[in-house]
Amino acid sequence: DAKTTQPPSMDCAEGRAANLPCNHSTISGNEYVYWYRQIHSQGPQYIIHGLKNNETNEMASLIITEDRKSSTLILPHATLRDTAVYYCIVRVDNTGNQFYFGTGTSLTVIP
Amino acid sequence: DAGITQSPRHKVTETGTPVTLRCHQTENHRYMYWYRQDPGHGLRLIHYSYGVKDTDKGEVSDGYSVSRSKTEDFLLTLESATSSQTSVYFCAISESGGLRYFGAGTRLSVL
């Protein structure tokens, strides 16, 4: 199973772009990269996912390197409500639809 | 909000007693999951289901059993609760692709 590595914590100034990196150097060709976040005490929330092309939705952008060994989640204009733990997951999909979370990156948006 | 409800939201119980947590969905999604979350460990998969009566183990399944007798309900049972099972439990659902929706969580304390 491909594993991911994320920095344990990051700060970002309010209104600036938050760039959250994720390393997944053992990713295989048919595995997707998913991002979730968890605001304190709440259930995790899906943000975005991608295979090899860059993706954008109303919440964020996902940039995946050409070799697919790393990716970056971009929150274009961070707000205080974006303070959360962000999880990068590589999908394991052999016998089921299993998703394994790591400890994520704790993002603090500073006023 | 997605139709996913966990019950109870909070429970305090004693060591050795049986406990059942319920996850109920109104989205008719095929896959359902139980995770636990503890400080320093992030979210860890306990069990998941890929259809009625079809379940499989996750990474921390010891001491837990699950049942899914109908699409909308996924039950997590602690046959004999231990203090190490004190945790926050999250249910999640998906149809295909990534985990899309999580429940609000159940906070379980085993004394």
Image: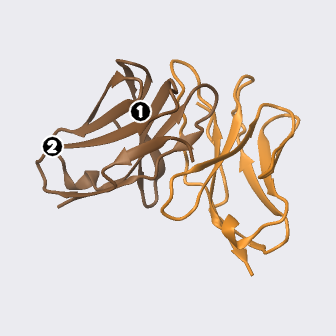
Chain colours: A orange, B brown
Provide the residue designation for mark 2: B18
> Can residue B59 be seen?
no
- Residue type highlighted by circle 2: Pro
| The label number, if any, that marks residue B58 in the structure image | 1
Measured in 3D between alpha carbons, the distance from the residue under mark 2 to the one under mark 1, in whole angstroms, is 21 Å
Where residue B77 sits, quadrant-wise, is top left
Q: Are marks 2 and 1 in contact (CB under 8 Å)?
A: no
For marks 2 and 1 on the same chain, the one whose residue lies earlier in the sequence: 2
- The residue depicted at 29 percent of the width and 43 percent of the height is B21
Whether residue A103 is situated above or below residue A4 in the rendered picture: below
- Residue type highlighted by circle 1: Gly
Q: Nearer the viewer, mark 2 or mark 1?
A: 2
- The residue depicted at 65 percent of the width and 67 percent of the height is A83
Question: What kind of element bears circle 1?
Answer: loop
Residue A19, percent from left and from top = 80, 59
Question: What kind of element bears circle 2?
Answer: loop
The residue marked by circle 1 belongs to what chain? B
The residue marked by circle 2 belongs to what chain? B
Q: Is residue A13 left or right of residue A27?
A: right
Residue A99, percent from left and from top = 55, 35
